[in-house]
């Protein structure tokens, strides 16, 4: 949702389609494209969640594939983790600036994904959270470890975004 960024529910895809009816368009957000790219590369699971917390930001986003379909939700709100009523030890804007704090922010958002979606694979990108093992230990503070699926850190988003967008165009 880009309400405060000048888009205010503008139907960009509809605009492009009306001006270029001979072309097909797919307009998706980056986290959904990464999740789709990750999902198609997994042989042993049909549900993947990807959480993205950019450096210096306290608001991230999640993309989830369940049974090989992107979950977009009502009015495309699925994955807008900024609306989760999570309790943090400090202001999330401050926490996200440092490794320890970012680990708390990412862990709580991933646990929320486990509790609501239960994906078979959790993936994330956050340069302030370098250790998957430490992240899993932080997550275990909020949910029993037996419920935490495999967790992978994604280092290069570009390869998954392009591949995922191509997959979503085909589907």
Image (tube, rainbow, N blue to C red):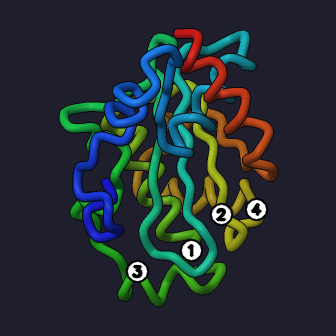
Residue beneath the point at 59% across and 67% down: 54
Q: Are marks 2 and 4 in contact (CB under 8 Å)?
A: no
Residue beneath the point at 26% across and 31% down: 73
Residue 36, relative to residue 116: is it above or below?
above
Q: CA distance from mark 1 to mark 2?
A: 8 Å
Residue beneath the point at 68% across and 11% down: 44
Q: CA distance from mark 1 to mark 3?
A: 8 Å
Q: CA distance from mark 3 to mark 2?
A: 14 Å
Mark nearer the N terminus (3 vs 2): 3
Q: CA distance from mark 2 to mark 4?
A: 10 Å
Mark nearer the N terminus (3 vs 4): 3
Mark nearer the N terminus (2 vs 4): 2
Mark nearer the N terminus (1 vs 2): 1
**Frontmost residue, 105 versus 171:** 171
Q: CA distance from mark 3 to mark 4?
A: 20 Å
Q: Classify mark 3: helix, strand or loop.
A: helix
Residue occupied by mark 1: 102
Residue occupied by mark 3: 92
Residue occupied by mark 4: 131
Q: CA distance from mark 4 to mark 1?
A: 11 Å
Between marks 4 and 1 in the image, the one whose residue lies nearer the viewer:
1
Residue farthest along the front direction in this orientation: 19
Residue occupied by mark 2: 126
Q: Are marks 1 and 2 in contact (CB under 8 Å)?
A: yes
Mark nearer the N terminus (4 vs 1): 1
């Amino acid at each position: 949702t880009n309400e405060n960024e000048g888009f205010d529910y503008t139907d960009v895809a509809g605009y492009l389609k009306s001006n270029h009816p001979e072309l097909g368009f797919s307009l998706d957000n980056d986290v959904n494209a990464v999740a789709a790219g990750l999902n198609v590369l997994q042989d042993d699971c049909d549900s993947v969640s990807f959480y993205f917390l950019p450096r210096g930001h306290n608001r991230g986003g999640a993309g989830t594939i369940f049974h090989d379909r992107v979950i977009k939700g009502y009015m495309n709100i699925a994955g807008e983790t900024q609306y989760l009523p999570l309790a943090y030890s400090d202001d999330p804007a401050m926490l996200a600036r440092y490794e320890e704090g970012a680990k708390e922010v990412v862990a709580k958002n991933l646990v929320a994904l486990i509790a609501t979606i239960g994906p078979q694979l959790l993936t994330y990108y956050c340069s302030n959270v370098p250790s998957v093992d430490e992240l899993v230990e932080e997550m275990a503070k909020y949910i029993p470890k037996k419920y935490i699926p495999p967790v992978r850190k994604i280092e290069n988003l570009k390869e998954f975004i392009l591949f995922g967008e191509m997959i979503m165009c085909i589907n």
